Amino acid sequence: MTLIRLRPKGQLTLPDSIRRLAHLDPGDVLEVTVEEAGIVLRAKKLIDADQAWFWTGAWQRGERKASQDIRDGRVSPAQGADEFLDSLE
């Protein structure tokens, strides 16, 4: 068990060992909730608005399918721009 002290302005310092175990870096965002068992901190990763499309469920399903196609050898590189463009049709 690790004990930490609440400072006068409400600040807490998480010990280095805890930050390492939780993979926390300076500037990371934590969600704070109060639950029956106590106060819970959860690390959150923020996504820039211009990158949010990539993290939608549909896009991630497509990424997983594409990765599986690559692993299973269902892809082949185009031999030039014309071949690439023809493959899109």
Image (cartoon, rainbow, N blue to C red):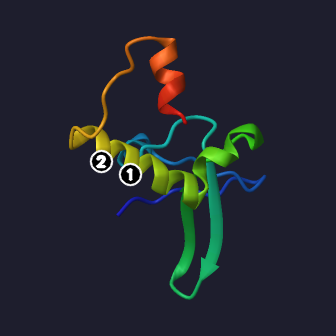
> Horizontal placement of 18 versus 39: left or right?
left
Residue 20 in view (yes/no)? yes
Q: Residues within 10 Å of mark 2 (few under 14, many from 20)?
A: few
The residue that appears at 51% across and 13% down in the rendered structure is 81
Residue 18 in view (yes/no)? no
Are the residues tagged 1 and 2 within 8 Å (C-beta)?
Answer: yes
Kindly indicate the quadrant of the structure image that contains residue 67. top left
Please state which amino acid type lies under the numbered disc 1. Lys
Q: CA distance from mark 1 to mark 2?
A: 5 Å
Residue 32 is situated, as x and y percent measured from the top left of the image, at: 65, 65
Can you identify the residue that label 1 sits on?
Answer: 65
Residue 24 vs residue 52, the one in the foreground: 52
Q: Residues within 10 Å of mark 1 (few under 14, many from 20)?
A: few
Name of the residue lying farthest toward the top: 80
Quadrant, the N terminus: bottom left
Kindly indicate the quadrant of the structure image that contains residue 69. top left
**Picture disc at residue 55:** none
The residue tagged with tag 1: helix, strand or loop?
Answer: helix
Can you identify the residue that label 2 sits on?
Answer: 68
